[in-house]
Image: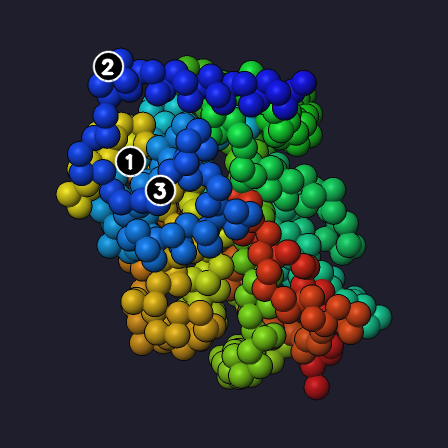
Amino acid sequence: MEFLIIILSLLLSYIVIRATTLLFGVGKPKNLPPGPTRLPIIGNLHLLGDQPHRSLAKLAETHGPIMLLKLGQITTLVISSSTAAKEVLQKHDRVFSARHVPDAVHAQNHARYSVAWLPVCTDWRTLRRILNSNIFSNNSLESSQHLRSQKVEELIAYCRQASLSNNHVDIGRAAFRTSLNLLSNTIFSTDSTSPYEDSGKEFKDVVENIMLTAGKPNLVDFFPVLKKIDPQGIRRRLGRHFGKFLEIFEELIEERLRMGRSKQDDVLDVCLKIIQDSPTEINRSHMKSLFLDLFAAGTDTSSSTIEWAMTEVLRNPHTMTKAKQELEEVIGKGKIVKEDDVFRLPYLSCIVKETLRLHPPIPLLLPRKVEDEVTLNGYTIPKDTQVLVNAWAIGRDPTVWDDSLEFKPQRFLESRLDVRGQDFDLIPFGAGRRICPGLPLAMRMIPVMLGSLLNNFDWSLDTIMKHEALDTTEKFGLTLLKANPLCVVPKPLN
């Protein structure tokens, strides 16, 4: 019955659109970007497949870096070159700064309060100011450096326990625990999971499910007429995942309020003070959605980048050798990398950049929307068009990158290219006013965690899953995860 309702709804939508076109002469606007031939009703949906970033990159080879598709009822612009990305994210940033919000993200009213999904408005500016001033500013990051160092030491201690018993380490899960506890301490001054045990699986599963569910192709996003039905149950599932986190946050907020005036001086204290002093700026719903954004985006993206980096280094032994040699010469074998060491470790930084080039955490970035009709490189882009920037395709563009599919960190040794949104050949964190606010923290934590793992152990593959461990098959969601976990055995240094 439900399937029949979906089909009838799609047919009705198509009939209404066609009738409007015939009656009112609504024709194809001039100067639209090129794109593949559309089918009735579904448009180009059949071309996406289960790896949209790859499918769209392939289509761009035929139709160009500025490509227009019809995904069901949604007109979608796909940007696949650094030149076009610069036009969208810099020159026309204001027009392209709104969000195209997936239906599932409306679960628990999250989109209404989330800094990631709000339009550029007063609430969004307030939340960004809280992030930039109290979490990700240079002063804030410097003052919390000891906390990050402690969490990395706990990661290495956990790996050392595994090495003594010759057990493998699930790199993604271990890095996730480190990121989770770091954020939990930054926000609430407490760990969310034990740093010395293989725990935190439930948290990791919830975050991974959030990113996979939010990134899953959803019929409602292509045919809004189905919104009330939620035929695939994606919004309902995401609502349950969101609910688990929001319940935890509510308990922590209530506990802090019962304590009265706190001396923790963490993010929770800052937010509660803002609500007390300026209740019209943000409310508790804003605060909980902000925490949800931080936990969802700040844990999965960093841990998956560490996992991809370790995978690529293990697949390229010469890279491992060179990285270990640099670490030994600069800070000494067996020592934990400090944040102040990173600028003296150029090859390690190159490994991080090369990993982000080949494996950007969010391959299509978060979708944007055109607020007003705009001309882009001579093409007319209609109002309300969804905009996808294929950072994955840009990072592998053979016209920009020599041996674009090869993992070659040395390509960055003589290059000034950076990931901070000014160089559009490399935009894993986006660019413009909607650039990822957590970029400064990620670029401190990732090289420190990766360098410490490489400098404290020799690593060998788990014999049970040698092939799967180094397999680079991707699991597509909002974040680009490794399909098969990297499980490797840490060995004491010779």
Is 26 situated above or below 305?
above
The residue shown at (64%, 47%) is: 181
The residue closer to the viewer here, 358 or 459, is: 358
The residue shown at (30%, 51%) is: 63
Quadrant including the N terminus: top right
Image side of residue 322 versus residue 234, left or right: left
Dot 1: few (<14), some (14–19), or many (≥20) neighbours within 10 Å? many
The residue shown at (68%, 59%) is: 485
Q: Which mark is residue 24?
A: 2
- First along the sequence among labels 1 and 3: 3
In space, the residues marked 2 and 1 are separated at their CA atoms by: 29 Å
Q: Is residue 391 at least partly visible in the picture? A: no
Q: Which mark is residue 37?
A: 3
- First along the sequence among labels 2 and 3: 2
Circle 2 sits in a helix, a strand or a loop, which is it? Answer: helix
Q: Amino acid at mark 2?
A: Phe
Quadrant including the C terminus: bottom right
Circle 1 sits in a helix, a strand or a loop, which is it? Answer: loop
